[in-house]
Structures are given as C-alpha cells and as structure tokens.
C-alpha cells in the first residue's frame, strides 16, 4: 500500500525525524492536503484546514510515533494500527 501523509507541526527537529522515518519506510510526506493522503501526522489535535480535510476524507490522524512504527515494520507485516496512535 502506498503511504502518503501530510504533516502539521513547527518543531523542526521532530519534522526532520519524521521525514527521515518516512524515507526509511518508503512512504512520502507532502506539505498540502490532497485526496491522495492516507494519514495526517500531528502531535496534538488543533482545528486546521488539514484536520478538517482529513476528517472529511476519513483519513487517520496519527502521532509521529505511528511513523516510527511504520519505519520499523517488515515489508510483509501489516501496517501499524492507526487507532493506537491518536494524538
């Protein structure tokens, strides 16, 4: 499954770690919300245009720890359960 996530945050250290973990997992991170997004990554819920789009599109909103779990899984393993990574 192709993973493409959008991210909200302003902590550059966390953002750089998340980008690296996405790279390791083979997923892609993008700046703007599109219908191709499979997840929205954020540390805590706040009402933004991206959150509203994720809710409308029924895409999981996950903490950065989801990305770490995604990067650590083996190719044949199922994707991590996004429900365990709610912000």
Image (cartoon, rainbow, N blue to C red):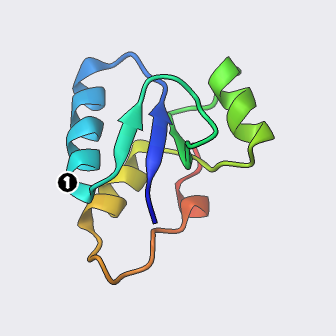
Closer to the camera, 74 or 42? Answer: 74
From what the image shows, is residue 1 above or below residue 66? below
> Is 20 placed left or right of 41 in the picture?
left
Q: Secondary structure at mark 1?
A: helix
Residue at point 44%, 78% (across, down): 78
From what the image shows, is residue 51 above or below residue 27? above
Q: Quadrant of residue 51?
A: top right
Q: From the top left corner, tell me how far across and down residue 44 is, in percent.
A: 56, 32
Q: Quadrant of the C terminus?
A: top right
Q: From the top left corner, tell me how far across and down residue 72 is, in percent.
A: 25, 66
Q: Quadrant of residue 16?
A: top left
Visible in this render: residue 37? yes
Closer to the camera, 87 or 15? Answer: 15
> Is 2 placed left or right of 69 in the picture?
right
Visible in this render: residue 48? no
Residue that carries the numbered disc 1 in the rendered image:
24
> Is 26 placed left or right of 1 in the picture?
left
Which residue is the extreme one toward the right? 56
From what the image shows, is residue 44 above or below residue 24? above
Q: From the top left corner, tell me how far across and down residue 29 is, in percent.
A: 38, 37
Residue at point 69%, 19% (across, down): 49
Residue at point 40%, 43% (across, down): 64
Residue at point 44%, 54% (across, down): 3
Badge 1: how crowded within 10 Å, few (<14), some, or many (20+)? some
Q: Quadrant of residue 30?
A: top left
């Amino acid at each position: 499954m192709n993973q493409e996530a959008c991210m909200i945050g302003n902590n550059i250290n966390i953002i750089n770690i998340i980008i690296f973990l996405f790279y390791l997992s083979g997923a892609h991170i993008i700046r703007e919300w599109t219908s191709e997004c499979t997840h929205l990554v954020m540390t805590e819920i706040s009402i933004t245009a991206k959150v509203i789009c994720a809710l409308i599109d029924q895409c999981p909103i996950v903490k950065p720890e989801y990305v770490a779990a995604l990067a650590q899984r083996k190719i044949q393993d199922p994707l991590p359960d996004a429900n365990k990574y709610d912000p």
